[in-house]
Image (cartoon, coloured by chain):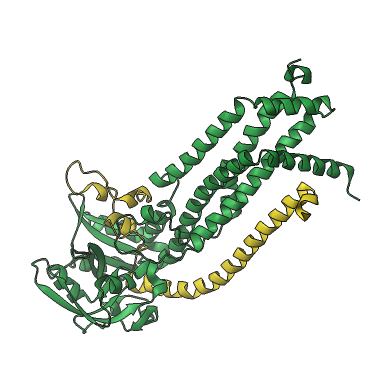
Amino acid sequence: MIPKNIEKQLNILDYALSSLWRRRLKSLSVLLVFAAVIFLLASFQMVTQALTAKAKQLLVHTPEITLQQMSAGRQEAIALTYSHQLAEIFGIRKVVPRIWGYYFDEVRLANYTIIGMDLSEIPGNALLDTTLLSGTMPEKAEQGKVVVGQSITKSLELGGRLTFSLFRPDLSLKSFEISGEFAPDTDILSHDLIVMNLADARDLFSIPTGLATDLCVYVTNPQEIETIAKKISAALPGVRVLTRPQIQKTYQVVFGWRSGFGSICLLAALAAFAILAWDKASGLSPEEKREIAILKVLGWETGDILAVRFWESVSVSGLACLVGITAAYIHVVYFAASLFRPVLMGWSVLRPELQLLPRLAAGDILLILAFTVIPYLAATVIPAWRNATVPADAALGG
Amino acid sequence: MIVKTMRPALVFSILLCLLLTVNGVLVLDSRLRGQDEKASLARLETLTSGLGLTDLAVATEARYTRHPAVSDMMAPFMDHPGAIEHFPTGTFWLPPPR
């Protein structure tokens, strides 16, 4: 036996759904637009959440401190002799020079990221071979050996070949032999990488001996990162000191609603709801007013009419929310956010196979609801309340 | 025909249940994908520490969106005096906090 109050609400819900079905074309249009707006907002939220979470998980393993030489507001090569000054700072475990940069392939119009370093120097290098699909990482003594990412293999169209050449700045060719290839599931870090030893990178970019792109500083106690960073800043005034917490913080804010694309998504949603709210708040249609008047003549109370409008709004917005969020999840996980790729990757020629797995928290869903369902409820129930309080004979024109 | 004789609230509930079932299947699939992700996460962590990486390789068109963590806020405007930022990915990524 259903309690009387619930039975009444079920009957009102029946009436509300029949009313929506009677105006099915209009209801379906509202539902689709509503779902599309929620899809846009939820997709953006899921992509940024997945990328931010991935960065958060991975960047705890970056070097504790990275040093870059700055000159006239630009990054320049840093002197290896700084290592001697750094050796005097207590708490520094190791200083590893690194040469890295971008190689623009003029034939394929692609940017490759070249990293040159003595891998044996880096703490945590022992398992690097496990990140490869095939082959091994180049040894310090192995000249001309490189490990490449998946996009590099595709871009260079190597087929079965293991050798390729890149141009030095003086346009002479430098040959390389591929000693390994990164596994596809590491694409989000490695797809555009060509990793080689320090001497090869120095030769390729023609960087003089005694200089490197940056210095990775490893400290003994991670609690002392900030203190050591301050000491380095004092000892080497022209050097930019980037700490691991700073790098991690970058990825906590770099994807956000304040970005141009995020703002467009948000503004599109707000504009859609402003138009909808304007349409609803400017008054009900004569048919809707007439329907309310007839219901009042038949003995319906103002509260009952409001309940009808409430259930109508909840049905439409709830269904749209469910459809929109489900579609957004499918878009992000199974289609790798393909609608956002033109903006997320822009003119990039090398594109990773993104494997995004967003984990929506209650806060994310509440944010989407706050921007969509709640304004819709307010926009539909308030005009109905205004109309329902008008005497029935006045609404019928009597 | 059966649908026509059912009360609208019941039809709506069935529709909602269908959608929730789809969501349930997606949740189960995400659990399975999460297990695969754990295996690849270990490799990604090794790669980050082994090469001292600082950034995700998502956008390769501009150095400040390829390596936002080690670029400064002036990088998009460095090409010449009065240069404006013109890469599409610049609309998705916010400048790093400094």
Q: Which residue is situated farthest in the front direction here?
A: B1
Viewer-proximal residue, A26 or A74?
Answer: A26
The relative height of residue B79 versus residue A336 in the rendered view (above or below) is above
Where does residue B42 sit, x and y in percent of width and height? 46, 74
- Left or right: residue B62 versus residue A344 is left
> Residue drawn at (72%, 50%), measured in percent from left and top?
B12
Using the rendered image of the protein, determine whether residue B67 is visible from the camera's viewpoint: no
> Residue drawn at (79%, 29%), measured in percent from left and top?
A295
Q: Which residue is situated farthest in the top direction here?
A: A398
Residue B20: name its quadrant. bottom right
Using the rendered image of the protein, determine whether residue A124 is visible from the camera's viewpoint: yes
Where does residue A13 sit, x and y in percent of width and height? 77, 42
Residue A156: name its quadrant. bottom left
Q: The yellow chain is which one?
A: B
Count of numbered circles in the view: 0
Where does residue A16 sit, x and y in percent of width and height? 74, 39
The relative height of residue A201 versus residue B73 in the rendered view (above or below) is below
Which image quarter is the N terminus of chain B in? bottom right
Viewer-proximal residue, A128 or A275?
Answer: A275
- Left or right: residue A269 versus residue B19 is left
> Residue drawn at (36%, 79%), measured in percent from left and top?
A128
> Residue drawn at (74%, 36%), measured in percent from left and top?
A308
Q: The green chain is which one?
A: A
Q: Which residue is situated farthest in the right direction here?
A: A1
Viewer-proximal residue, A21 or A314?
Answer: A21
Where does residue A149 sit, x and y in percent of width and height? 32, 73
- Left or right: residue A227 versus residue A315 is left
Viewer-proximal residue, A246 or A338?
Answer: A338
- Left or right: residue A52 versus residue A153 is right
